[in-house]
Image: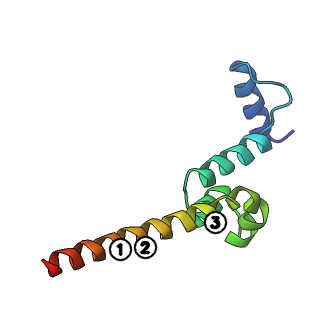
Amino acid sequence: MPLHSVRTRRLLDKHGFSKKLSFHNLRHTGATYLLQNGVDLKTVQERLGHATASITLDTYAHVLDGKDIEAANTIQSVFDTHCSDEKQDNTHNKS
């Protein structure tokens, strides 16, 4: 068993984690949480030690599925704000 696995297992055992939990599970969970909480793909790629961001993207694309809706909502709010500002400007100009 690799040294990092032995150390990880000891740490997990010490804190009462399940024997089914592995270093790989922790790594995957950590990367998933980072992406879900807005950490950019390049940073996650570097933390995981992947050679390219495409490796990270291929592995974690499912985590980013909801980001499309988030992006659409963000751009919608930008348009809503811009249109609202224009309406206020036009109202003030007519007075």
Q: Residue 86, percent across and down?
A: 29, 77
Crowding around mark 3 (Cα neighbors within 10 Å: few <14, some 14 to 19, many 20+) is: few
Considering only vertical position in the picture, is 46 above or below 4?
below
**How far across and how far down the image is residue 8, in percent?**
73, 34
- The answer to whether mark 1 and mark 2 are in CB contact below 8 A is yes
Looking at the rendering, which quadrant does residue 56 occupy? bottom right
Task: Point out residue 77 in the picture as x, y percentages from the top left corner.
Answer: 44, 65
Asked whether residue 62 appears in the rendered view, the answer is yes
Q: Which residue is mark 1?
A: 82
| Dot 1: element | helix
Quadrant of the frame with the C terminus: bottom left
Where is residue 14? Give x, y as percent.
70, 19
Q: Amino acid at mark 1?
A: His
Amino acid under disc 2: Phe
Disc on res. 68: 3
- Other residues around mark 2 within 10 Å, as few (<14) / some (14–19) / many (≥20): few
